Image (spheres, grey):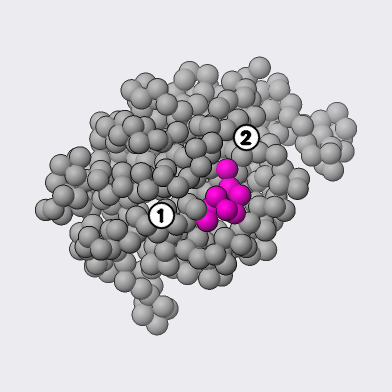
Amino acid sequence: MSTLFSPARFGRLDAANRIVVAPMCQYSGIDGSVQPWHAQHLGQLAISGAGVLTLEATAVERQGAITHGCLGLWNDSQAHALAKLLSELRSFARLPIGIQLGHAGRKGSAQAPWLGGAPLTPEQGAWTTLAPSALPWGRDWPVPEALDQAGIDRIVAAFAAAAQRADRAGLDFIELHSAHGYLMHAFLSPISNQRRDGYGGSLSNRMRFPLEVMRAVRAVWPAQKTLGLRINGTDWLDDGWQVEDAIAYGRALLDVGADYLSVSSGGARGGVTIKLEPGYQVSFAAKLRQALGCPIVCAGLIADPAHADAIVTRGDADFVALARALLDDPRWPQHAGISLAQPQDLPPQYQLAAAGRWPLARRAA
């Protein structure tokens, strides 16, 4: 049996294999609520053969959205629409389904990527963004408002309230978005956090806000349900967040109840060049796994099944998260199983297209 297709514990949940559907923003919500597009998108991913499915980054307050089309869990109407969709998915899919909760911070109030991703203009409905310090994310980006204590407390409470809605909607796990320059990571990185109070300066101070969020969510999230975080292994900047910081942060997160860490990188500010190659973030995942011993998810230009299998076989990570590979090929897990000599079952409705049932069914991912 290939390691990629072996069962594993995903925090407090059981996963049939080591393939995780990564959160993928669709920028297609209306007033923060799921739409028919999300039903078809998630329906395909739910029957892909992956072991775990993560819904896209979802804002905990309106001011924390990336775009006008982002999903949200800041009100009960959004939670009711999500609960209905989850009920439909579970009528045909049997896998853990979770959601990534986050706050865009100074990277919010932006256009959808296919419109260029630039900051919104006032005529396009721009809003004031929030950050630890009044520093723009990049050239031509607006100066955000530096959060005061009341604002910090409000956002911590918003994360907890969104987690409660996620529970009532029927989600199995939460992943807090603490990477890519969004608000939780903006507090962590010295690139974006230049505060002089108890939330800035030393690493322990910069971790204070994200740990407050983590504690607040863990306090309301059921004990039997998994709670993880996506964190940066590096900012790819000499004066930014480093893997040693990630290890210290990961240790603090585990102390307050984190069940897994998904390791990514970048996004601390605009204009940073990263050398992209298959598995370019795996080394950071491996260092965190070795140092912390907790379940680790890795991602980053992983599309070859043999590569994915080697990552988990070596012990560099426990799970491999896929995003664009699944957009390109929603049957990636089944095709990976063929290439690794471990065929995976298709839904019965599709089995006439399975290997041995159709002469052209020889494709491997």
Disc number for residue 159:
1
Q: Is residue 360 above or below residue 146?
A: above
Foreground residue among 103 and 253: 253
Q: Quarter-wise, where is residue 78 in the image?
A: bottom right
Percent x, y for residue 143? Answer: 24, 67
Are the residues flagged by discs 2 and 1 in contact, CB closer than 8 Å? no
* Three-letter code, disc 1: Phe
In the image, farthest residue toward the bottom = 123
Q: Locate the C terminus by quadrant.
A: top right
Q: Which SS type dominates the magenta stretch?
A: helix
Left or right placement of residue 210 versus residue 83 in this view = left
The magenta region covers 165-172
Residue pointed to by mark 2: 51
Q: Residue at x 46, y 28 (%)?
A: 295
Determine whether, in the image, residue 92 is placed left or right of residue 212. Answer: right
Which residue does the image show at 57% across and 33% down from the upper left?
Answer: 13
Asked if the stretch drawn in magenta spans residue 166, the answer is: yes
Q: Residue furthest left?
A: 196
Residue at point 34% right, 32% down? 255
